[in-house]
Amino acid sequence: MEGPGIGSVSVAALLLVLVAGSDGMAGPAKESWGYVDVRQGAHMFWWLYYSEAANSSEVPLVMWLQGGPGGSSCGFGNFEEIGPLDRNLKPRETTWVKAASVLFVDNPVGTGFSYTDTEDSLTKDVAMVAADMMVLLKHFFSNKTEFQTVPFYIFSESYGGKMAAAISLELIKAIGARQIKCKFAGVALGDSWISPLDSVLTWGPYLYSTSLLDDSGLAEVTAAAEQVRTAVATGQYVKATELWSYLEGVIEQNTDGVNFYNILDQNGDDTVKSTKGQGFLSLLMQRHIQPLHGESLDQLMNGEIREKLKIIPENVTWGGQAQAVFSSMAGDFMKPVVDIVDKLLDAGVNVTVYNGQLDLIVDTIGQQNWVRNLTWPGIRDFTKMKWTALDDPESQGQTVAFYKTYKNFAFYWILKAGHMIPSDQGQTALRMLRMVTQQE
């Protein structure tokens, strides 16, 4: 069912258009977008780019899920990372549309151009997120029947990975029950918040090993991290989220405001330097949602893009409910979903983990810890394997990543990249996409 704001535009007639770059050259060959009512009062926005590849009917379909929760896939993922145009509406050389058709979804409801009629309709946890996505995917594949037989992958970033894991598990159930017709081929978890505690407990050692903490700072960070561990162990997840925010403040104070998304990047003047007088959710919003809603991107989405789409309700502002989305999910932040990854692997789903070397918020050490503790029978043999180096095709002999694959599990270590890998290492991310989707 189409959501409010579409008016007389039917699914069959949804705007299929040519996008012109500023140089007059054609952008993506074909695209479409729309709303789906996933529940009463909950309206989810999606945006599809058909692949530019010559054999576009044979290449996979990739759904991209942003993090936050509250970060917009249709905004940030599209114009800052992998879409055909950048935020200046210039063609992106490393767009994933070269190798796949790409479906961006503003997820959960309330994110980006998605919206709810009241805050009571916002999601509370990944189970609700997954249930909403099943409604959207059923609608999508029922109306875009050409994608029912091509490989379908879910790629994600940050909290999007946590949601992607839950969505993938529900998707294989829905496919088995013949509720959704698609060829699900795998899920890729990028710098993903799969095991929050493993990330939190390794922040200190990681920063210390990179000379961003001294002995005194390490002791303070370790003590704060242990408080988070205690809260999680006793099931006090909202308290754990509050303590997580406090821990980040301790890190900022001891590192002169390290950038949580790339430890080699300098934070701007708006870095959170003090926690006085601010609630923990407000602080977390500043650190982890506001970077996805920069002023220039906000102007683009609420200006030219809104005018182009023509279906956004007058009372909906891109990103207007982001803070409410983030707050609504507060009790879910520190809950792990490692068990879901185990279930996916046991079910034979292809699972890929990829992580940036310079990411702090989801550091690679923490990722390796939860991976090492999977109960999936193949993890022991995977752990014993040596990784393989990937060379930079533009600089012979220059290693840009390492990877290893065993049965239906793969891990990619992306060098010189932070949390937003496609932004930091676009060519490497595009090559990884081709490898994961078995195009090379």
Image: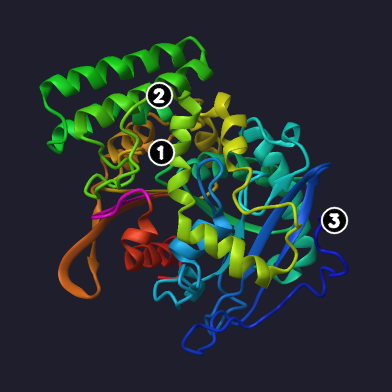
Is residue 415 found inside the magenta-colored segment of the image?
A: yes
The residue labelled by disc 1 is 287
Q: What kind of residue is marked 3?
A: Met
Mark 1 falls on what kind of element? helix
Q: Which comes sooner in the sequence, label 2 or label 3?
A: 3
Residue 137 lies in magenta, yes or no?
no
Where does the magenta region start and end? 411-419
Mark 3–mark 1 distance (CA, rounded to whole Å): 36 Å
Visible residue check, residue 62:
no
Q: Are marks 2 and 1 in contact (CB under 8 Å)?
A: no
| Residue marked by disc 3 | 1
Nearer the observer, disc 3 or disc 1? 1
Which of pointers 3 and 1 lies earlier in the amino acid sequence?
3
| Towards the viewer: 344 or 424 | 424
Q: Which quarter of the figure is the C terminus placed in?
A: bottom left
Given this view, does label 2 or label 1 mark the residue nearer the observer? Answer: 1
Q: Position of residue 105 (x, y in %)?
A: 62, 55
Residue 278 picture location, percent across and down: 45, 25
Secondary element at tag 2: helix
Q: Quadrant of residue 42?
A: top right
Q: Is residue 10 above or below residue 270?
A: below
